[in-house]
Image (spheres, rainbow, N blue to C red):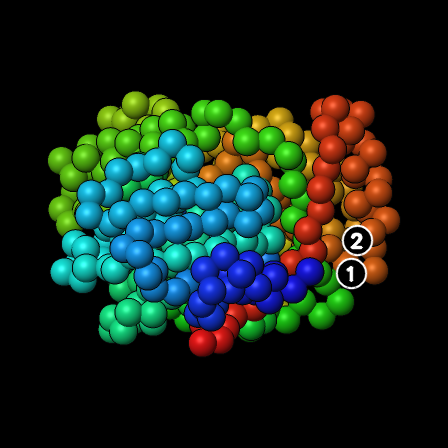
Amino acid sequence: MNIPLHISQIHESRFNQKPLIVRSPGRINLIGEHTDYNNGFVLPAATDKAIYITLSASTDATCHWFAADFSDEFTTTLDVLQPSPKNWPNYLLGIVEQFQKMGHSIPAFNCVVSGDVPAGGGMSSSAALECATGWGLAHLFNIPLDKLTLTRMAQRSENEFVGLQCGIMDMFASAFGKHNEVIRLDCRSLDYEYFPLDLADYQIVLFDTGVKHSLASSEYNTRRQECEAGVALLQTLESDIHSLRDVSEEMLLTHQRKFDPLIFVRCLYVVQENERLLAACEDLKRGDLETFGQRMYGSHNGLRDMYEVSCKELDYLVSFTTTEKSVLGARMMGGGFGGCTINIIKADAVDDLFERIQKAYKIAMGLDLKMYKVSIEDGTSILSV
Ligand code: GLA
């Protein structure tokens, strides 16, 4: 189905107006997990799976919003913004609130939302929706906005309105994505560099566990606190420590005995993951995909054993691939406790591997496995006016 065409037709028939159409993609992250909120590095990219929103100014001072994928309507005014139990409108309301905080009052608007980013798969459909909404409203109401401000708004909206203390990776990847390039983002300075991802005859494939364990968001916030506790201790021992980005493995080991063992191992994971990512970028520059793949396994092991954000379903899928010759690397992707694994697999072996891993996963976990082949595409854009 042509999603943008489909929702613009819905928009025209519901509101009798020709809309602005915005696309903002879901993201993958090749390596560098739980590093963004520690001011570290990440290596995400925008994908062909995206959220689309149609927008036009309302004619009756009330917002009429429609989520086409679950036929759900939402109406509101924009004077007093309150989180909705429906959940999906909160991603739009949070962005409106950010515009208001920046001194821009947003007139009532109509919209239709749809997309093919798998929900709960850890590809950040929420960041995509926030970026699409912010970019679209800025264009619709002639508000000057650059993409860096857009990503900061989207992150604050998620932190303040939705209530998730996420980092900036997801929004940044959605907004700044570029066809066939991954983004090495320094989350401290927000400097970024594009790297061409030449996979030759390999393909990026996500395996979706089909689970999202309920402790995902509480454990996410706990991990943040554990990292902050580590930084607070190091600040009493060393000068110029603002985040785990300023910490080396050597420094951690020097002070190991002063640490609570759990806090120590969390911090060690983050410091090692940053190092791993920088080394992985060197692999990419050399075209050494094999070593890059091994670092993906290293990242998974750290997330499983040290940071403890994996789960048995993710571990099963990663471990299955370790004896497959066609797989260069695999690891859990995103916050953890469910969602997808990301894999680099020889393109002509993908379907055969999927058939076998799907059967094995069903027997081992009693769950249906889904697969998404993803390509790397451009970030947030206006499709037509
Ligand atoms: C979630 C968050 C991101 C990032 C990842 C883990 O996707 O939204 O900001 O912290 O988890 O790398």
Q: Residue at the location (74% across, 24% down)?
A: 366
Disc 1 vs disc 2: Cβ atoms closer than 8 Å? Answer: yes
Q: Residues within 10 Å of mark 2 (few under 14, many from 20)?
A: some
Q: Can residue 40 be spotted in the picture?
A: no
Query: Where residue 336 sits: x, y (%)?
Result: 51, 36
Q: Residue at the location (41% across, 37% down)?
A: 87
Q: How far apart are labels 1 and 2 at the CA level?
A: 6 Å
Query: Where residue 25 sits: x, y (%)?
Result: 51, 60
Locate the N terminus and report the quarter of the image it occupies: bottom right
Label 1 sits on a secondary structure element that is helix
Nearer-the-camera pick, 219 or 275: 219
* Tag 1 residue: 347
Position of 338 relative to 157 (above/below) = above
Q: Residue at the location (67% across, 44% down)?
A: 207
Q: Can residue 71 be spotted in the picture?
A: yes
Q: What's under tag 1, amino acid-wise?
A: Ala
* Tag 2 residue: 350
Query: Where residue 77 sits: x, y (%)?
Result: 27, 47
Q: Relative to 370, is 10 on the left or the right?
A: left
Q: For residue 291, which quarter of the picture?
A: bottom right
